[in-house]
Image (cartoon, rainbow, N blue to C red):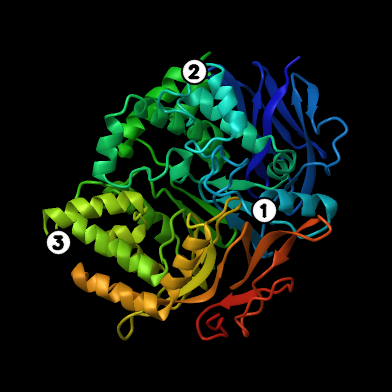
Amino acid sequence: MAGLRLGPLLRYVDADSATVWVETDRPCEVRIRCEGGAGGAEHTWQVAGHHYALVPVTGLVPGSATPYQVLLDEQQVWPLPDSHFPRSTIRTLPASGEQPLRLAFGSCRWSATPSKAAHDPVGPDALDTLAATLAADPDRERPDVLLLLGDQVYADQTSEATARALAAHRDLTEPPWKQVADYEEYTHLYYESWLDPEVRWLLSTVPSCMIFDDHDVIDDWNTSAAWLARMRTTTWWRERILGGLMSYWVHQHLGNLSPAELAVDELYAQVRAVPDGTDLVREFAADANDDPACARWSYRRDFGRVRLVMIDTRATRVLDEGNRAMLDKSEGEWLRQAVLEGRGSYDHLLLGSSLPWLLPHLIHAAEGWNAALCAGERGPRWARRSEFLRQRADLEHWAAFPDSFTALTELIAEAGSGADAPATVCVLSGDVHHAYVAEPHWRGAGQEPTSRVLQLTCSPVHNSIPGSLQAGFRFGWSRSGRWLGKLLARHGRLTRPPVKWRRTGGPWFGNQLMTLTLAGRTARIALDQARREKQGDVRLVTVWRDAAAGARVAGETGDADVSARGTDRPKSG
């Protein structure tokens, strides 16, 4: 009898359909059976000896919560026998799109502490804590969708358990040592992460949208041309990047697509039509790595009158010094169309970017300064030293691609201006292992968008940050940090950015998730941290409260109201 190896993951959900992803231990038919007669079935397809299915579920009722079962060759395998979790349900969106939409987001999750980690995670896993909270109170408000903004797995920082699995078939004293080497080893990371009982149940009952960041492949992935050239000289990089892109396509990317998009995806159709799709997926990964135009990892989702545009900030970079860009020309054109098409049909625009658009002022200036020096602004000696600093200090956010930073800023202003502008434009990010809220203001008369624009950053879900870096981030927001940033900008001969910004919330450090609740043309923000109480209980504590005070009080619950300009706004925290 076929068994369930991984999943189920509830991925895409709209008003009357959904998709459910699973891995099984052998070829079989996977059936999703729902109460009320809705459901769907698919035969598994194979990649590298593993068997997967992404099952479209149809016939669902808008605005409903429908329990479901997973059957393999008509034998029920989910819910698990004797499970103490509530039944997994598919909660569809309302047909009208007028009910509130709750989106929880975050990034950077160690499923287990890496071996020889420089610092241990502080506190409990925020996803585990969210799952336990919802399981204990099934009637509690839950996210309508979970946005995972990168570093879902850490290919370059494996746990002792994963390292032992790797050691069973290769010598860990040889490159890439305890890092994963290929597709098969990537599968161990997903087992370790998604077989966690709480997370497994959570992902089975809350839809998820995902995008990769660097650790899904390797720290500082595509930082610069010099970085990439160095990686290509190694004996192991080619297999690592192919395994990373293959496993991302299988485990994360396909589930981001709607049933209609899956129906016209040529590679997906080809893989399902052959006994073994390994060579097809490997060839696709190789083409995507050699020519980013061959693949599009970015995608758009419309949740009623809320538009999410998830941006790939890693794989389509242009790294040629002097012509650097976060997005290549094709990707930039796609982003512009995804944002502006049908403008007026949505009340809120969410831009998912694993890397923050707005950083602490000193860090923003340092990245622009470093980019200018690497490009030769102060001569070859400065350029060599600056390249070393760029790779050592991870100076590769939007600010390190000044033209791309300006282009994104201009696109946000265009999307947020005029009679059809949405109420809010929010950039949702992670990566930097702390959370904050920042609000930009455009320079020059008449440049300010109509929409309320916010940078919302939330990280990590389960990771940590040394005290020295916490102090550095705090200093980066300070008046002294801004002053030092101006000196760096002057030395790098930088032009003034088109916006200035202020921090209106945070910084917060800990394992955390941020939630946006969008209703009509208003939005509410909540920042929840996973905390362990003295008696050993773990719970989510809201640390960001009402907008008028702009303060944060541990243990007190409250949200920040966000709406179009001209209404109350958070004051500086």
Q: Nearer the viewer, residue 52 or 162?
A: 162
- Residue 420 % position (x, y): 45, 72
Q: Nearer the viewer, residue 542 or 305?
A: 542
As measured in the structure, the alpha-carbon distance from the residue carrying label 2 to the one carrying label 1 is 34 Å
Asked if the residue at tag 2 contacts the one at tag 3, i.e. Cβ–Cβ closer than 8 Å, the answer is no
> Would you name the residue on which mark 3 appears?
377
**Tag 1 secondary structure:** helix
Judge left or right: residue 553 versus residue 477: right
Hey, what amino acid is under mark 1?
Answer: Ala
**Tag 3 secondary structure:** loop
Residue 222 visible within the image? yes
Q: Quadrant of the C terminus?
A: bottom right
Q: Residues within 10 Å of mark 3 (few under 14, many from 20)?
A: some
> Would you name the residue on which mark 1 appears?
126
Judge left or right: residue 331 versus residue 76: left
Q: Quadrant of residue 67?
A: top right
Which badge, 1 or 3, comes first in the chain's sequence? 1
**Tag 2 secondary structure:** loop
Report the residue at 41% width, 76% height from top: 501
Residue 498 visible within the image? no
